[in-house]
Image (cartoon, rainbow, N blue to C red):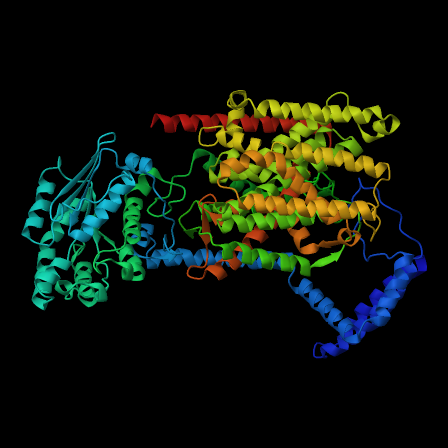
Amino acid sequence: MKNCIMGHKSSRSIYREKLEAVPRLTSEASKFALMMEDEKHMQVVAVAASEKPAPAMPHATTVAEFGVVDAPVCSAPYRSAASHLSACCHGGAKMAFLAYSLGKREINQYFSIKNAKLLSVAAVILLTLFHTVSRYYGGGDTCEWLLSSGRYLGETVWQPYGCMMHKYKNTEAKTCLAEKRVAFVGDSRIRQLFYSYIQIIDPAQRADGRKQHGNILFEDRSTSVNVDFLWYAEVNNSLKERLISWRKDPSIKPDVVIIGAATWSIKLHGGSSEALQQYRANLTAISLPLEQLAEDGEVYWVLQDPVHEEGLSDNRKMITNEQLELYNKVVLSTLNSNKKNSKARVRFLGASRQAAMETISQSADGLHLPESTRNVAAMVLMNAVCNKVLRPIDGSCCQALPAPSLLQKLTACVFLGSALVFLVLHALGHNRSWKSRPTPPDVESGEEKKPATAASLLNHKAPFQALCKMGLIMVYFYLCDRADVFMKEQKFYTHSTFFIPLVYMFVLGIFYSENSKETKLLNREQTDEWKGWMQLVILIYHISGASVFIPVYMHVRVLVAAYLFQTGYGHFSFFWLKGDFGLYRVCQVLFRLNFLVVVLCLVMDRPYQFYYFVPLVTFWFVVIYATMAMWPQILQKKANGSGMWHIGILVKLLGLLLFICFFAYSQGLFENIFSVWPISKLFELNGSIHEWWFRWKLDRFAIIHGMLFAFVYLVLQKCQGLSEEKGEPLFSTRISNILLLISVFSFMTYSIWASSCKNKTECNELHPYISGLQILAFILIRNIPGYSRSLYSSFFAWFGKISLELFICQYHIWLAADTKGILVLIPGNPSLNIIISTFIFVCVAHEISVITNDLAQVAIPKDGGALLRRLLAAGVFTLGLLLVSRSAEGNQGGH
């Protein structure tokens, strides 16, 4: 056996020497010939190596703990089958396989993760420069973007260029416009806009057909909102007098003026050039009063929307799009001509004009806009007026940058200090090093991982270097979702935007299928694969806005429950098998889970509960730890001696179930406990505990399902009740077929039920009780067939290893506006934008995972005394942050 392995290694060395000796100009056929020669020798080595089967690994220990296996080892029964298969294979198929292998090797050689990260850094720098220069020289006022241009997403959803438009509710509109006066001045088109505007404030309002050519007054007495329509069909002296009177008497002056007129001038004068010149003269006469009103108020001139010329009546045929365009040019060249006072600017509403180009054919009379287009114009105006007042998260248009908070400034100082220390140590050549500790455990599976090289060295400047990298990454986070550098757009769901990427994703995952190193149920590679494809589905779900489609929403709810199921399964297995309840491992898990979120809370000025999944997993880990560590500590070793201990662990799980049910039906007690300071700071969102209650209750049984499944599986494994050998079904053929049939039926039944859901509230009530069945069905389908257990997708498994970072990072550097919108790095090309932003997003998530592991080795020492001192320091630091945060909230409340 030893000689065979040595022969195998020497063969590899000889092969590499041959391949490297091939000149670069040599044809690829020469390389294929060398690969085929090596392939024949590899088959001989594999047969020789299989004569002595490798010892079976216990399930508690992962393959990663033994190091990376160089090549799969075949057992004797498969040797003859492999030889027959090799004899039957066609030469062309082997050439295709070798071509695939060579291509994959070449790709891996030139496109490593390191090179990918370098490309992502270059892309970020170039894109930041591009957007900064574009805003500086091309005009980066998001109000101008909102008012001037956009496009339809679908048939009714309007997307302004480069920013997000909030859909205002009546309560929000009343809050914004409280004790304000808004005046709509103009003709019948402005009157239509007036009615759409007041319907946002009071949806019960309807157009009054009796008031055709008169003034209309609207007042909401509860908030003292006044919105008036004043009939001025032409720009003339009477309009000028009205504007001057407002300027002279501040008590009647409106805070917001929306004005526009032109169609009557065209109609009454037959579209003559003299009428256009008179229009210019009259507009020049009112320009000064308008600019004076804009000094301490807001004035919006509504550009003329197009008409549907074929639908116009005979007495309106002279109102052509060509005439309207001439009048719009006069407006744009006449108003804001006073360069001395740049603050007194009249803003132009052209977005409705652009929207009407696509919908005017639906007009009833060819002149007036369809209701959907009028509603777009009214909502654009509401955003222009109210976004800077209410600052909605999903309304990025017309919002000024907020000043950094005290915590954000302190965090920036910490990162700058780390960079300074790193530079000093680097300049001094401070490279004294120590051996690295084991990398932190996988926080979702609970399994330990070994470092790639046990003797890798860390020097004293390594932690500061990691913090420097983290600081630079946080700068990118801040630029994406807090600074006014990159564009943002709102989500819009269609079935194609969700299901087409989903199909591509699973095709890629299947294409990268490989042989698994072990065939145990839920082995490490399989759980990584599971987490990976679930995370990718969730990412597609978020960016496509699929939460509005209830069947997809309910299926994704099962995926979130499956993550928590894995948390229960992994941590129970670890404690049951190894019995390690030491503080070191607990701190490793908590650090790995929370480091990124804590940094983001400080940098992005968001509460801990905002990143709801991490508080949820952290809470349940503490619960699992308390359940398993409390007296009596029941481990597998103890249970092997007496079957009564199995009953004891079941009693513990029953107690945990009763604890969960008690709090699930005691919402008042639950909220009182979690509303106590400082605990409330961890679980409150927008001053309420409701979001935490909703998340906790929705998947409250997933953890205990995972723990119970782990217990039953480990007991069956110990009793040899399962067949986990390669190629063999998990149970007997009959039982396996029955369980597979039940599992498939369960999947189909759930999908039919989810498709029939009427609303999320009703379906969420049933979700905690049925999600566990779907998770169990998936595990059985994935693991009962032997061939299924022996394969896994390396594509999905790679993403599974960074699933936590992917889930958290998406909030700010893939999505935007705290997940409400989409980050736009490449404007005007949605497909290319998704490709580039996804590439950068994945590289950042992977680097953060590396940084977190590196810092965990330094921050969490194995020495008990040192660990306690650092925990004390961390506690003081956390308390300080809470006090500073509370003081800042008090100051804001005082203002």
Estimate the x, y position of residue 382 in percent, counting from the top left: 29, 44
Quarter of the view holding residue 328: bottom left
Left or right of 552, for residue 741: right
Is residue 523 shown to the viewer in this render? Answer: no
In the displayed structure, would residue 270 be above or below residue 66?
A: below
Q: Nearer the viewer, residue 235 or 282?
A: 235
Estimate the x, y position of residue 414 in percent, counting from the top left: 53, 38
Count of picture labels: 0
Q: Nearer the viewer, residue 618 or 663?
A: 663
**Residue depicted at 43% across the width and 35% down the height:** 405
**Residue depicted at 71% across the width and 29% down the height:** 583
Estimate the x, y position of residue 445 in percent, counting from the top left: 70, 40
Estimate the x, y position of residue 319 in percent, counting from the top left: 16, 64
Quadrant (top left/top right/bottom left/bottom right) for the N terminus: bottom right
**Residue depicted at 81% across the width and 42% down the height:** 59
Quarter of the view holding residue 462: top right
Left or right of 10, for residue 146: left
Left or right of 176, for residue 299: left
In the displayed structure, would residue 151 be above or below residue 689?
A: below
**Residue depicted at 44% across the width and 34% down the height:** 406
